[in-house]
Image (cartoon, rainbow, N blue to C red):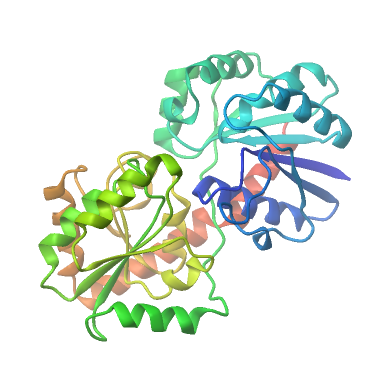
Amino acid sequence: MYKIVQVVPALGWGGAQVFCIQLCNALAKKDGYEVTLISMYHHNPQKHLPLSMLDEKVKFITLGKKPGIDPGMFLKICQTLKNIRPNVVHTHLHAGYYCFYAYLQLTYPYKKIHTLHNLAKKDAPLHGRKMFKYFFKRNIIEAVTISEEVHASAVKEYGACVKTRIPNGSDKIKPTAALKETTEKINSLKKNSSTKVLLNVARITRQKNQQLLLDVMRHVTNENVIAVVLGDYVTGDKAIYDALIAGKPSNVHFLGKVANVSDYYLNADAFVLTSVFEGMPISLLEALSAGVIPVCTPVGGIISIVTKDTGFLSDDISEASFYKALRLYLDSDEASIQTLKNNGKQLYNKEYSMHSCADKYDALYHSV
């Protein structure tokens, strides 16, 4: 039995967490594989992704981490890994540095991987980056980056020991049993049957910069277009959410977090992302798979995906620049839009499916 352990802080509503679940599911389908997903925090159904997203073959363990720095977590992870005795430990987000103690204590041969889901300085705080540098340089942990931009930031931070880049992948968008209900809900928000629907799938946070979306949507309040925002906020970002709601134009609708995001993609015409920094957004890959045209800011791995052949990219993150990109989308003819949809689907199938991504990680797990 080939044992793979994935470790995350918690299954919060974020792209990295969705990616981790989908990677676990894909790996669990391989013959002779035993996949375990460890969440440092206990699972909270009110705050975290539904466990129904996990394949029944994936074992799920929670360790009851306390808020803030929890020294006891180092021992819990070490004991858990000792009991499992995995062939591979693959960490994500700040779960990475809680495994350092285990890596020093458990000396039998096993592969240790850490994926940087964002620019290096955003992926871990200073003390975490100092420790990662120690483990990366000594080839104890292999760093994986998800885009050219993230890779460049990691090399700058950690040096030439960072060599591996595996672009993110995602499952293809498929309808759920709630599609009809969702379609009716979206139709109720439209001005008429021809209204274009822009979809923003992102946490409510300064990074995702929904304020820019609101500012640009004010320019098109008299046009036949609306924006739908799907996403929740953490406690510390409630003030951001409150300010957005208080100042939003009438053509923007905040619907919170939903369990059937895929149905909203299938009711959207364009996917809008106004982030100030990114790694490689899973939401963007999902949009491509659904044939939804991306209109995005030029940050992180987005610039490798959104080109003149697949969508519309602003020159920078200013209001004027993003409005220009949105204007180009709104003024495009149907033939051009259809070409972009087809190109996006082809790019997804070739480079960004979870099947392709999981195969690349599987090859890395078995590499010397």
* Horizontal arrangement in the rendering, residue 196 relative to residue 186 (left or right): left
Q: On the rendered image, what quadrant is the N terminus found in?
A: top right
Q: On the rendered image, what quadrant is the C terminus found in?
A: top right
Q: Is residue 53 visible?
A: yes
* Horizontal arrangement in the rendering, residue 254 relative to residue 116 (left or right): left
Q: Residue at x 32, y 44 (%)?
A: 239
- 110 to 160, vertically: above or below: below
Give the image location of residue 37, x and y in percent: 72, 45
Give the image location of residue 275, x and y in percent: 32, 45
- 136 to 182, vertically: above or below: above
Give the image location of residue 160, x and y in percent: 51, 18
* Horizontal arrangement in the rendering, residue 56 relative to residue 122 (left or right): right
Q: Residue at x 47, y 82 (%)?
A: 181
Q: Residue at x 13, y 55 (%)?
A: 324
Give the image location of residue 274, x and y in percent: 29, 49
Q: Is residue 346 visible?
A: no
- Between 44 and 309, the one lying in front of the other is 44
* Horizontal arrangement in the rendering, residue 33 relative to residue 239 (left or right): right
- 279 to 233, vertically: above or below: above
The answer to which image quadrant residue 223 occupies is bottom left
